[in-house]
Amino acid sequence: MTVKARAFANIAFVKYWGKRDARLVLPHNGSLSVALDFLSTETSLDLLSRSADRDELTIDGVAATERERARTSAFLDAAFGNDRARACIVSQNSFPTAAGLASSASGFAALALAAAEAYGVPASVDRSALARLGSGSAARSIPGGWAEWRRGEQDDGGDSLAVQIAPPSHWDVRLIVALTMMGRKEISSRDAMARSVETSPYYDGWRQSSPRDLEGARSAVLARDLRALGEIAEHSCLKMHALANTARPPAIFFEPATLAAWRAIQGLRAQGTPVYATVDAGPHLVALCAAADAERVERQLSATPGVVRTICCAPAGAAEVLA
Ligand code: 2P0
């Protein structure tokens, strides 16, 4: 029997950057995001017969690399046990993975949901905690909407899960993704954050200051306060990049076009448009603004040198098992 699930990617306003437990993917700090309606992954999963000794994985119509397959199998083993039946997985992104847009969040969320259904995991087992074992940010794509992934205090990670703090309809904002460069990024988030924890002299400052960002961002979302959320988002983003930039060796994600786009956002703000920027572990920028300002922001970003394409997203909902 084939199980199919869909999940949306998300963009964090309070970033997750660093694990206190790598095996269980337990973060040092809680994070907060919104799901993006234009960026999704649909995953179909079939359990293979007991004689099959390896999982099969196809991503966007192409057989996955050995590395991708190994990470997927390791996730399924961690979440559903080593003695599980192997699976045939077909995953389709609504956006090109090669563009370097975060596909691990929507990818692992859709996979976790489909696999939990296929392996008969009781509904009482939290799906975001399962998705977290594949990729931290995937935990937030399970509830979708405006989501908060709690740090949790338990050593087994039982309380480190994501919840929806407000539905997508709560606040009519737009998230404009400015793609600055095609091509896969050179360093994975996983490696860059591990290196940041181990070697950045600023990591303690990050750990100490993040809870306040999280509280402020949560209140700003609930109050629909764009300025408050935007200021915290830029601050959290620049702190995260400061950690990566000061790791040894450094992980520098900004490209010239990323900074040009950041300047364009500042320019729009100086002219009176409330718009804020954030950048993940890659060269693309995401602008946060009111729906009414989206066209102006998109026009300005499109005209920025080095920006190759823009994608305008609205808040999206939870991951779902599809009929
Ligand atoms: C985030 N990022 O909060 C942060 C900000 C990127 C920048 O979570 O190692 O793929 O699989 O847990 O979730 C991207 O890292 O890392 C990420 P793993 P993940 O969205």
Image (cartoon, grey):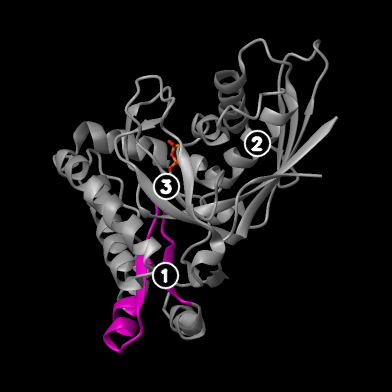
Q: Secondary structure at mark 3?
A: strand
Residue 273: say if magenta. yes
Q: CA distance from mark 1 to mark 2?
A: 28 Å
Q: Give residue 48's position: percent from left, percent from top.
A: 81, 21
Residue at the disc numbered 2: 113
Residue 53 highlighted magenta (yes or no): no
Query: Is 62 placed left or right of 22 in the picture?
Result: right
Would residue 12 appear left or right of 18 to someone viewing this image? right
- Amino acid type of the residue tagged 2 in the rendering: Leu
Q: Which amino acid does the dot numbered 3 rest on?
A: Glu
> Distance between the Cα atoms at labels 3 and 1?
18 Å
Taking the spot 44% from the left edge, 25% from the top edge, the residue there is 158
Quadrant (top left/top right/bottom left/bottom right) for the N terminus = top right
Q: Label 3 crowding class (10 Å Cα cut-off): few <14, some 14-19, many 20+?
A: many
Q: CA distance from mark 2 to mark 3?
A: 18 Å
Q: Residue at x 49, y 36 (%)?
A: 135
Is label 2 in a helix, a strand or a loop? helix
Which residue matches tag 3?
Answer: 148
The residue at 56%/67% (across/down) is 313
Q: Quadrant of ligand 1?
A: top left
Q: Residue tagged by mark 1?
A: 288
Label 1 crowd bin: few (<14), some (14–19), many (20+), radius 10 Å:
many
Q: Is residue 191 above or below residue 301?
A: above
Q: Nearer the viewer, residue 31 or 48?
A: 31
Which callout, 3 or 1, points at the residue further toward the start of the chain?
Answer: 3
x and y, in percent, of residue 113 in the image: 65, 36
Q: CB under 8 Å between callouts 2 and 3?
A: no
Residue 262 percent location from the top left of the image: 33, 71
- Range of magenta residues: 264-290
Q: Residue furthest bottom?
A: 271
Can you tell which quarter of the image residue 289 is in? bottom left
